């Protein structure tokens, strides 16, 4: 599959959505006040508060309001780059001390190895920050999977996952033609945007996903080993 690019969503596609919402989000939410206390006055904290202020369009913003805003965004799962950044920083510490493990479904390690060995170039595109993506794949129960992955894209370096422009931006960065680029996701809106950019698309709806299957307009599978990569690229 030389000349082929595969771009993977994380939540609901290669890893459990429940792990994100039931483990990772509460872990970071609980530690928001301590993070700001530990980093008060640092360049990273000052820049983050400024990013939140600009996102809100506020005239000024202090640390307490920043913490309250990030907490509210966590509860509403707002796809704000500032929230994704600080979550990634907090999770990084949790991965480092063994408190957290990146969740991937059982077939993922072998699938990624097989696709990598075939010559396909594998990338990740998630609303979570690049740092959180790297840590997720570096600290799985199956070991470090990052050597199988070529690049990572997030809201900062690509844009909204529901915008076709984001997929065109990624396509330009990876240098693979749209008709040789496959996107796998559990989100119909994301798949629609990728298809609008000319990408090949396959929907992933796991057995524990309550949403309807198939996903309208996209071939739909229940796991990444349900078909081989040639079949997925052909949409069969």
Image (cartoon, grey):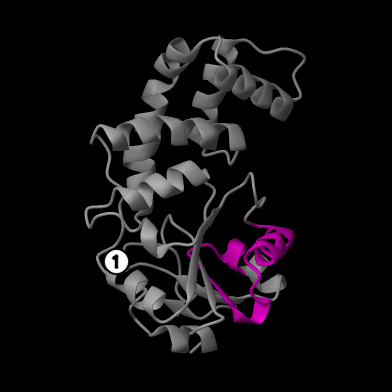
> Dot 1 surroundings within 10 Å: few (below 14), some, or many (20 or more)?
some
Inspect the magenta stretch and tell me whether residue 24 lies in it.
Answer: no
Q: Is residue 138 above or below residue 196?
A: above
In the image, is 143 to the left or to the right of 13? left
Determine which quarter of the picture holds residue 168: bottom right
| Along the viewing direction, whichever of 91 and 121 lies nearer the viewer | 121
Percent coordinates x, y for residue 77 in the rendering: 52, 39
For image coordinates 44% across by 64% down, the residue present is 211
Percent coordinates x, y for residue 54 in the rendering: 73, 26
| Along the viewing direction, whichever of 58 and 102 lies nearer the viewer | 102
In the image, is 15 to the left or to the right of 176? left
Q: Is residue 19 above or below residue 6?
A: above
Task: Count every numbered label the image shows and give the total.
Answer: 1
Q: Which residues are magenta?
A: 162-191
Q: Is residue 166 above or below residue 27?
A: below
Residue position for label 1: 109
What secondary structure prevails in the magenta region? helix
Percent coordinates x, y for residue 139 in the rendering: 29, 48
For image coordinates 62% across by 66% down, the residue present is 174
């Amino acid at each position: 599959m030389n000349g082929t690019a595969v771009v993977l969503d994380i939540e609901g596609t290669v890893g459990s959505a429940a792990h994100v919402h039931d483990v990772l989000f509460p872990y970071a939410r609980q530690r928001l006040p301590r993070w700001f206390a530990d980093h008060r006055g640092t360049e990273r904290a000052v820049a983050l508060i400024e990013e939140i202020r600009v996102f809100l369009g506020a005239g000024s913003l202090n640390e307490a309001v920043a913490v309250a805003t990030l907490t509210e965004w966590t509860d509403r799962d707002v796809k704000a780059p500032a929230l994704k950044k600080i979550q990634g920083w907090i999770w990084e510490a949790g991965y480092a001390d063994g408190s957290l493990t990146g969740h991937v479904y059982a077939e993922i390690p072998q699938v990624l190895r097989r696709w990598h060995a075939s010559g396909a170039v594998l990338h990740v595109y998630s609303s979570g920050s690049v740092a959180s993506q790297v840590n997720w794949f570096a600290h799985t129960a199956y070991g470090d999977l990052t050597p199988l992955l070529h690049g990572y894209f997030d809201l900062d370096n690509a844009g909204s996952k529901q915008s076709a422009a984001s997929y065109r931006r990624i396509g330009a960065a990876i240098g693979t033609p749209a008709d040789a680029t496959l996107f796998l996701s559990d989100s119909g809106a994301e798949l629609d945007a990728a298809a609008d950019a000319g990408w090949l698309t396959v929907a992933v709806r796991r057995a524990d996903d309550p949403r309807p299957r198939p996903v309208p307009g996209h071939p739909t599978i229940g796991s990444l080993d349900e078909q081989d990569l040639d079949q997925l690229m052909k949409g069969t």
